[in-house]
Image (cartoon, rainbow, N blue to C red):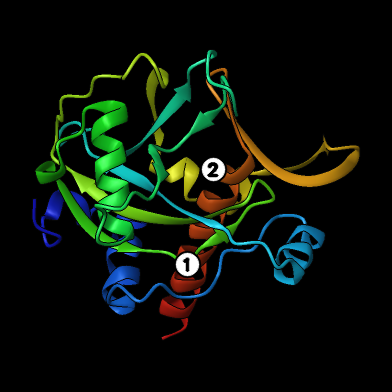
């Protein structure tokens, strides 16, 4: 699937994605801000070593006539952390991984059965530092029109998709709050067909949505 494919270019958000990562040229770019500024301040001041991890933002166009979607997962309720939450496929970097992209592709294959060769990597974003001690790098990829996806039952309860146009629109996200270790934290969340996208997943997607909106604004003025 080539970026110049007219089936991709007829969608504004896909056009923006292609322009954005063409300009980025795989430059990690700026760090992704946490929705709660206090969390960013704490993570910048801490002396702890953050564990590196990557997630994949998989964009798929199921058919020529249908709008593009982003693949998301619901984590298994049996997991010890973030059980039952909506997430992007991904996980911790391992010694055999040469870079963040390899981590994202390997984890996506393990979690949802996505073959690495069916992913056209567009680029990556900057890292987001999480209070849980992880430094997460999002990687964005276009998928073949109808990839075969199979959830790993140990890690993934369900696979679903949500419209790219929805997830890549900043105003789709609502401000909310949650209690974290006795403190109230500002978070972002989005609801779609009974699924609640929040936490780091919402922060990453909202950041990318804002980047694309800024690019559209600049392009509109040009």
Tell me, yes or no, whether the two marked residues, 1 and 2, touch with CB atoms within 8 Å: no
Residue 189, above or below 25: above
Residue appearing at x 88%, y 42% in the figure: 184
Left-right relation of 152 to 42: left
Determine the image quadrant of residue 202.
top right
Residue 218: where, in percent of width, then height? 47, 79
Residue 145 left/right relative to 159: left
Could you classify mark 1 by the number of other residues whose Cα lies within 10 Å: few (under 14), some (14-19), or many (20 or more)?
some
Residue under label 1:
126
User: Could you say which is closer to the camera, residue 87 or residue 91?
Assistant: 91
- Left or right of 150? Residue 55 is right
Mark toward the start of the polypeptide (1 vs 2): 1
Residue 102 percent across, percent down from the top left? 25, 53
Determine which residue is flagged by label 2: 201
Is 88 displayed left or right of 133 in the figure? left
Query: Does 189 sit above or below residue 168?
Result: above
Position of 193 relative to 127 (above/below): above
SS for dot 2: helix
Q: CA distance from mark 1 to mark 2?
A: 14 Å
Where residue 133 appears, x then y in whole percent?
62, 51
The residue sitting at 52% across, 74% down in the picture is 30
Identified at 48% across, 23% down, the residue is 75
Closer to the camera, 165 or 27? 27
């Amino acid at each position: 699937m080539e970026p110049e494919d007219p089936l991709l270019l007829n969608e504004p958000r896909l056009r923006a994605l292609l322009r954005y990562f063409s300009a980025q040229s795989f430059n990690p770019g700026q760090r992704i801000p946490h929705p709660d500024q206090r969390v960013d301040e704490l993570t910048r001041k801490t002396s702890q070593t953050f564990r590196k991890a990557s997630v994949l933002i998989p964009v798929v166009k199921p058919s020529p006539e249908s709008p593009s979607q982003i693949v998301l997962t619901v984590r298994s309720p049996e997991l010890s952390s973030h059980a039952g939450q909506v997430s992007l496929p991904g996980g911790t970097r391992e010694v055999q991984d040469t870079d963040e992209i390899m981590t994202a592709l390997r984890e996506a294959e393990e979690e949802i059965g996505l073959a690495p060769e069916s992913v056209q990597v567009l680029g990556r974003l900057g890292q987001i530092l999480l209070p849980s001690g992880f430094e997460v790098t999002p990687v964005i990829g276009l998928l073949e029109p109808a990839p075969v996806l199979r959830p790993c039952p140990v890690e993934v309860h369900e696979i679903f998709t949500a419209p790219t146009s929805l997830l890549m629109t900043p105003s789709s996200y609502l401000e909310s709050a949650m209690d974290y270790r006795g403190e109230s934290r500002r978070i972002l969340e989005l609801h779609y067909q009974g699924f609640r996208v929040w936490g780091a997943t919402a922060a990453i997607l909202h950041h990318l949505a804002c980047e694309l909106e800024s690019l559209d604004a600049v392009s509109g003025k040009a």
